[in-house]
């Protein structure tokens, strides 16, 4: 298993964690059919790796003893056909979260107490792989303009096609803090990243999932001219015969 160029600072370790996490999330969401096919129960013990370049790989565990880095769960393929597919993916996600944390804190072994606390805080600001895979925040519960959430840069269209922008949270009353807290739990339907009020978000009018504008290549200016926004997944589904 390849390791990044020895990340040692909090920022470097978090960057390594984020990249590995992105690869694992992609395997269990966007590339899930390919991942499922690679986990053949008739093969030897297989592991799911996320790499520092945001790629993923299903392969045999490292032969070195002890390994260069902590190893992910061994033999994830054996349980594939004995479980409900969704339950199996959820189980792999939980084990992946544990592995990602173990790698991050292995790399951060020489951090002091405050640095470890800061590293965990950065990691905890991201949704877990399990939360992304199981969609623990249902689309219908995600905040919209009409719900009163204060999300700067987020847009949602009304039935007449007009774009509605949520107000900047710094102007919100204290009474609306609970709504803002709820919005911060929203996950991007593309990358799985958490809500950030400093970024532009857009909601799909078909599936009601929220996306970073940058993830779906939509700018605030472009959103103004779109009467009904369809995310890439919904566009593909509707385009099929």
Image (cartoon, rainbow, N blue to C red):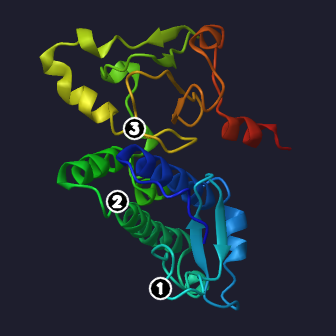
Element type where label 3 sits in the image: loop
* Residue that protrudes farthest toward the left in the picture: 175
* Cα–Cα span, label 3 and label 2: 29 Å
The residue positioned 81% from the left and 37% from the top of the image is: 239
Residue 48 is marked as: none
Q: Residues within 10 Å of mark 3 (few under 14, many from 20)?
A: many
Eyeballing the image, is 214 above or below 62? above
Eyeballing the image, is 100 above or below 147? below
The residue positioned 34% from the left and 59% from the top of the image is: 108
Q: Which residue is mark 3?
A: 186
**Mark 3 vs 2, N-terminal side:** 2
Front residue of 104/32: it is 104
Q: Residues within 10 Å of mark 1 (few under 14, many from 20)?
A: few
Q: Residues within 10 Å of mark 2 (few under 14, many from 20)?
A: many
Front residue of 241/186: it is 186
Eyeballing the image, is 169 above or below 110? above
Q: Is residue 50 left or right of residue 7?
A: right
Q: Is residue 239 left or right of residue 171?
A: right
Q: Picture coordinates of residue 84 (x, y %)?
A: 53, 76
Q: Picture coordinates of residue 172 (x, y %)?
A: 22, 13
Q: Which residue is mark 2?
A: 108
Q: Picture coordinates of residue 76 (x, y %)?
A: 55, 81
Q: Picture coordinates of residue 228 (x, y %)?
A: 63, 19
The residue positioned 28% from the left and 34% from the top of the image is: 182
Front residue of 118/237: it is 118
Task: Point out the frontmost of discs 3 and 2.
Answer: 2
**Mark 1 vs 3, N-terminal side:** 1
Task: Point out the frontmost of discs 1 and 3.
Answer: 1
* Cα–Cα span, label 1 and label 3: 39 Å
The residue positioned 48% from the left and 73% from the top of the image is: 69
* Cα–Cα span, label 2 and label 1: 18 Å
Q: Which residue is mark 1?
A: 66
């Amino acid at each position: 298993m390849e390791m990044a160029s020895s990340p040692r600072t909090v920022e470097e370790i978090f960057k390594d964690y984020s990249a590995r996490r992105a690869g694992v999330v992609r395997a269990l969401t966007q590339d899930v059919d390919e991942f499922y096919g690679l986990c053949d129960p008739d093969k030897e013990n297989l592991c799911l790796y996320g790499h520092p370049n945001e790629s993923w790989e299903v392969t045999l565990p490292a032969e070195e003893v002890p390994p260069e880095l902590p190893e992910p769960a061994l033999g994830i393929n054996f349980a594939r056909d004995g479980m409900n597919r969704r339950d199996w993916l959820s189980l792999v996600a939980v084990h992946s979260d544990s592995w990602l944390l173990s790698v991050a804190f292995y790399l951060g072994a020489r951090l002091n107490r405050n640095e470890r606390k800061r590293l965990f805080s950065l990691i905890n600001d991201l949704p877990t792989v399990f939360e992304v895979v199981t969609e623990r925040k249902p689309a219908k519960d995600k905040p919209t303009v009409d719900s009163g959430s204060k999300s700067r840069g987020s847009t949602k269209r009304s039935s007449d096609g007009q774009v509605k922008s949520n107000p900047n949270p710094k102007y919100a009353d204290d009474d609306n803090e609970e709504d803002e807290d709820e919005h911060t739990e929203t996950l991007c339907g593309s990358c799985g990243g958490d809500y950030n009020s400093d970024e532009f978000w857009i909601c799909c009018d078909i599936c009601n999932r929220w996306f970073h504008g940058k993830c779906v290549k939509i700018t605030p200016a472009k959103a103004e001219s779109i009467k009904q926004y369809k995310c890439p997944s919904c566009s593909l589904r509707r385009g099929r015969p």
